[in-house]
Amino acid sequence: MVCLFSFKSTDNGGDGDHRKRKNEASRSSNEEKKKITLDPNTTYYTSDGKVLTKELAATRSSSAKLGVNATENLSAFEKLTVSEYLDIDEKNFEKPAFKPFQAAFKGYYTLQSQGLINKPILTIIDFSMHSTERRMWVIDMEKKEVLFHNVVSHGRNSGKEYATSFSNRHESFQSSLGFYKTAEAYYGQHGLSLRLDGLEPGINDNARSRAIVIHGADYCNESVAKKQGYLGRSLGCPALPLELSSKIINTIKEESCLFIYHEGQEDYFKKTRLI
């Protein structure tokens, strides 16, 4: 088992520092599972005195929370994913949990390498979460910054408090999982809206013909949701709060990546070719 502890760099050595390291190692064992970001001014060590890279230190210090097995060697891409996650700035909004980010980043990276998305914006919706929670993140992958973190509606036939059922069928009024490319903005019955192209055959590729778009809606209201216990639902669209919809649409429109995730949908993970 690898024990991780950290301390600020000093110029003094000797027994005092040794005792300090030992005490801090003891304290760190209680805090280990709580850590999720690292102090860039702190040096991180294993119990045998080796300095860890940021990626491996992060994995060992927060393996339970990140869901990465610290006893295994990470691939180059896994290291990149952990590094990208840790680099996301949370000064304005908190970032998503690691698992949905990990899945989203893999697909984002693949689609970007294939030239299917051309904007360094990654939008993640985590439909594993309760509808009253803020379960949508818009991340600038170049600036490593969360631009928006807000509530988002799921389809009315996907569930009430939680989205549990998903479909690619017409007239199902359910949400669809997977990766999308954002397309053109337009003005429709909901005002400024954004068309989506589903990129996964049999999973969400009927999105455009089903008129699954991003739009604002008065039923996507955080205050009302908290009073009634669930967020208002759509006909399958990821609907947004009216006060944010135009800003978000103008940020993510025209070939950025949208990923709709659900941790418990094993059928999706068996079918997708992007994760």
Image (cartoon, grey):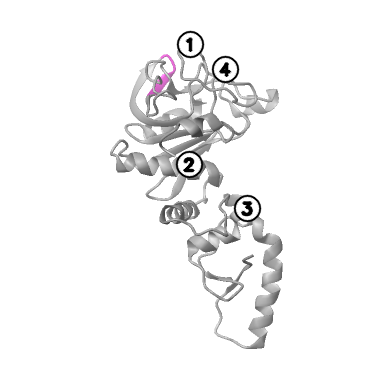
The residue under label 1 is 171
Identify the mark nearer the N-term, 3 or 1: 3
Disc 4 and disc 3: Cα gap in Å?
Answer: 34 Å
Disc 1 and disc 2: Cα gap in Å?
Answer: 28 Å
Q: Which quadrant of the figure contains the C terminus?
A: top left
Residue 266 or residue 90, whichever sits in front? 266
Identify the mark nearer the N-term, 1 or 2: 2
Q: Which quadrant of the figure contains the N terminus?
A: bottom right
Q: Please give left or right for residue 275 compared with residue 233 in the image.
A: left
Q: Residue at the location (32% across, 33% down)?
A: 255
Q: Residues within 10 Å of mark 1 (few under 14, many from 20)?
A: few
Q: Can residue 38 be seen in the rendering of this structure? A: no
Give the SS element for disc 3. Answer: helix
Proximity of marks 1 and 2: CB atoms separated by less than 8 Å: no
Q: Amino acid at mark 3?
A: Ala
Residue 193 part of the magenta-drawn span? yes
Give the SS element for disc 4. Answer: loop
The residue under label 3 is 64
Q: Which residues are magenta?
A: 189-194
Disc 2 and disc 3: Cα gap in Å?
Answer: 17 Å
In the displayed structure, would residue 221 be above or below residue 110?
above
The residue under label 4 is 156
The residue under label 2 is 103
